[in-house]
Image (cartoon, helix red, strand yellow):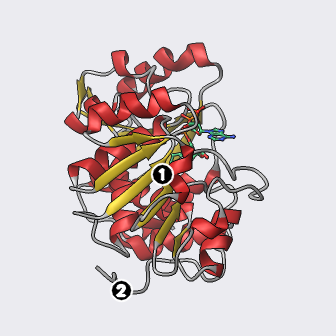
Amino acid sequence: MTPLFPAPGSSLTVCGSLSLHPAPVGAAMHLAGYRALGLSFTYVPFRVARVADLEGAVRGIRALNVRGAGISMPFKQAILPLLDELDPVAARIGAVNTVVNDEGTLTGHNTDAIGSARALEEVMTIRGARVLVIGAGGAARAIAFALADRGAALTLANRDEDKARSLADETSATAAGLDAISRGPWDAIVNATSVGMGDGRTSIVPEEAIAAGQVIMDIVYKPLETELVRAATRRGARAIHGGRMLLHQAAGQFELYTGQPAPLAAMDAALADHVIKPPGSHDGRDKPSS
Ligand code: NAP
């Protein structure tokens, strides 16, 4: 077990998260990673009492020398003016999900971007692939920039088409309405909307629009077994559930905090203890098909 208190003469590095409603899964993944590498780190999911307390919470990170913190909604944009520096990717996305504290200098990062790319790269090559991202909210922004930077032929579809157009302009993508889902052909479809969150029974992708061999990634992770993941599995597509992006964005944070490669297997096992994986979906253990 990672010690909560350091042995005499040694120090303990504290990381954590700032959230209105802390969930145990982030702490579980990070603590498992620290344990696997024998690091003298610990992780505290800090609960911010009220939205208006964000500024005080950020002052606390600095004052208490907390090494890094995950940032949840609704703080991902509000935290921008409270930071000293922004990583270029986070600056372009305009949102921060991770803060790194280097001796009092706070830098904002966005590991949702790399997390989504790594989740897809486990099963496909992004460069040149025809990828449809559905959504134009915060998560879709991070995914769109990540995939555009990696050379995907990107189309963005959203219920509010104006939002899709504006994001497409920023990422050199093509904008579309939701009718594009059935038009294809798409090598990969990513659901970056919140449709399916909660009871997991609704899907924004009609089942008949899913083809065998296609990659279907649902970023919704509550629940992991969404109707989209079930339909993709039934149709013989490569289904990626929202846990993969969740794992890889946490791995990106881990690497920023510790400077070491994330022990993915240990972090994945901790994720699995907190969420039940859907049968037949991609779990990252098989080889990329490229
Ligand atoms: P957000 O900023 O509120 O954006 C919501 C998006 O969903 C918008 O594009 C919205 O379209 C669309 N939408 C909502 N209800 C819809 C409906 N009934 N029909 C069609 N489109 C609908 O939310 P977010 O932060 O991007 O998060 C989206 C989801 O991603 C959440 O479930 C979140 O938990 C998940 N997420 C997962 C990860 C991960 O690591 N796996 C990371 C971040 C977020 P309009 O613009 O037309 O309203």
Q: Is residue 165 left or right of residue 51?
A: left
At a point 69% along the width and 53% down the height, the residue shown is 196
Mark drawn on residue 5 = 1
- Give the CA separation, mark 2 to mark 1: 40 Å
Quadrant field for ligand 1? top right
At a point 55% along the width and 31% down the height, the residue shown is 160
Kind of residue at disc 1: Phe
Dot 1 falls on a residue whose secondary structure is loop
Of 37 and 168, the residue lying toward us? 168
Q: Nearer the viewer, mark 2 or mark 1?
A: 2
Of 75 and 169, the residue lying toward us? 169
Q: Tags 2 and 1 in contact by the CB under 8 Å rule?
A: no
Instruction: Answer few, some or many: residues within 10 Å of disc 2's Cα (few below 14, many 20 plus, some between 14 and 19).
Output: few
Dot 2 falls on a residue whose secondary structure is loop
Q: Is residue 176 left or right of residue 178?
A: left
Q: Quadrant of the C terminus?
A: bottom left
**Ligand 1 lies under 8 Å from the Cβ of mark 1:** no
Residue 108 seen in this snapshot: no
Of 246 and 290, the residue lying toward us? 290
Q: Is residue 197 left or right of residue 41?
A: right
Mark drawn on residue 287 = 2
Instruction: Answer few, some or many: residues within 10 Å of disc 1's Cα (few below 14, many 20 plus, some between 14 and 19).
Output: few
- State the image quarter where residue 281 is shown: bottom right
- State the image quarter where residue 224 is shown: bottom right
The mark nearer the N terminus, 2 or 1, is 1
Give the x, y percent position of residue 22: 63, 41
Kind of residue at disc 2: Lys
Vertical comparison of 59 with 117: above or below = above
Give the x, y percent position of residue 33: 42, 65
Vertical comparison of 157 with 236: above or below = above
Give the x, y percent position of residue 7: 40, 57
